[in-house]
Image: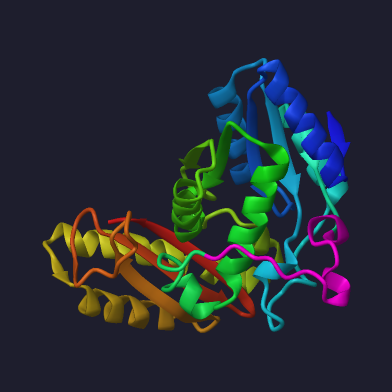
Amino acid sequence: MRVIRSTAAMQRLARRCQREGRRVGFVPTMGYLHAGHLSLVHRARRAIGPKGLVVVSIYVNPTQFAPTEDLAKYPRDFARDARLCREAGVDIIFAPSDAEMYPGKSDGRYSAYVVEEKLSRGMEGASRPTHFRGVTTVVAKLFHLVLPDVAVFGAKDWQQAAIVRRMVRDLNFPLRLIVAPTVRERDGLALSSRNKLLTPGQRAQATVLSRALARARAAVKRGPLPAARLKADLARFIAREPLARLDYVECFDADTLQPAARAARGTHLALAVFAGKTRLIDNGRL
């Protein structure tokens, strides 16, 4: 396994793979890897075959964090990540610096961003207005540098995956996008690097996200109901946990991300909840 930190070196390798006809599978991450990330690595390997090159990027992207968010506290452990990647059969870790990814940004000379204008308006986009501009910009840059044939994202960030899929389509990126299932702990909590930031009490109450999803599925099994009624019920349900605070809950169409007036089987539901100061997200099909 090789670690590349230079954007120029990464692009040289990617171009060589293209010349040689060697397929590249790509998993973009912000590090502090867990079993969910490794499932994406294995999915990338299956997609490109044993002779392909699996690239994992490890980069905590500053442009998707607002000044009030947890950029400085975001967990990092590169040595651990490298060990997990090696054990999972990763061929290349791409771990650039901020100066490599955003040349000139430190003195105000960086000014080019990629913006998706429809799918990014609601849910995470409404709660974190600058977030998706940072996501689409860094993912577009990574796609240009890694030149993947296949890129794998996790379904836990459903809106993000939908936005990246739209960007790939609209900007003609020549790659296949795979969205892999969410990996969960035994008690239902979706795996997230931010779970490390939870106290034991917060960790116990964080399962309210997956329990809310289960409650919503049980409700729609009895028949369709107004989405507003379901969302109000879930807000009350989450409020029972003293360490949990609801940011949003939304029922929507899985493809268009448009809010749904009625919740029924097949409707998608997403929610964001603060457990203490740590913000967690989850989603699922009802």
Q: State the residue at coordinates (65%, 16%).
A: 50
- Among all residues in the image, which is located at the extreme left? 223
Q: Residue 110, how many percent across, how many down?
A: 78, 69
Q: State the residue at coordinates (82%, 70%).
A: 105
Quarter of the image where the C terminus is located: bottom left
Q: Main secondary structure of the magenta part?
A: loop
Q: Looking at the image, which is closer to me, 174 or 179?
A: 174
Quadrant hosting residue 151? top right
Q: State the residue at coordinates (68%, 44%).
A: 144
Q: Say whether residue 101 is magenta.
A: yes
Relative to 94, 262 lies left or right: left
Label tally: 0
Say whether residue 278 is visible: yes
Q: Say whether residue 110 is magenta.
A: yes
Relative to 208, 17 lies left or right: right
Q: Residue 185, how many percent across, how many down?
A: 54, 50
Q: In this picture, is 63 found above or below 179? A: below
Q: Which residues are magenta?
A: 98-115
Q: In this picture, is 194 found above or below 21? A: below
Say whether residue 198 is visible: no
Q: Residue 112, how many percent across, how many down?
A: 69, 66
